[in-house]
Amino acid sequence: MEEPVSITVHIPPGIPLGEHTDPERELLMLAAVKAYELGRLSSGQAARLAGLSRVEFLKALSGYEVFPFQAELEELEQRDGADECGGR
């Protein structure tokens, strides 16, 4: 099993990361949300990165204005479109 990677981030004063959150936790959540949104991580992988269960992560996505089932929706839309073209 691979060793975890540690990084150090220097956050200048005045950069808002959330008033009542731990900056490290918030940055991990932001990274997880964006990687999920871009399709680079599955919801399970992103949840692990954020330190949450998959259900907690999916519920939290709305707070970041990310639809939790975008990949599934796009797959269904593609499948639906293929069915319509094949049915003609």
Image (cartoon, grey):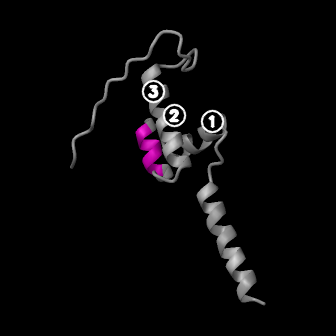
Q: How far apart are marks 2 and 3 (CA)?
A: 9 Å
Q: Which residue is tagged 2?
A: 30
Using the rendered view, name the quadrant where residue 12 is placed: top left
- Residue type of the residue flagged with mark 1: Tyr
- The correct choice, above or below, for 67 with respect to 25 in the image is below
Residue drawn at x 46%, y 52% is 40
In the rendered structure, which disc, 1 or 3, sits on the residue that comes first in sequence?
A: 3
- In the image, taking residue 49 as reference, residue 38 lies left or right, namely right
Q: How crowded is mark 1: few (under 14 residues within 10 Å), some or many (20 or more)?
A: few
Q: Which residue is tagged 1?
A: 64
- Residue type of the residue flagged with mark 3: Arg
Disc 1 to disc 3: CB gap under 8 Å: no
Q: How far apart are marks 1 and 2 (CA)?
A: 8 Å
- The correct choice, above or below, for 53 with respect to 69 in the image is above
Secondary structure beneath dot 2 equals helix
What is the magenta range?
Answer: 44-49
Which of the numbered marks, if any, corresponds to residue 25? 3
- Magenta-colored segment: predominant secondary structure: helix
- Residue type of the residue flagged with mark 2: Leu
- Image coordinates of residue 57 in percent, x first then y, are 54, 41
- In the image, taking residue 38 as reference, residue 73 lies left or right, namely right
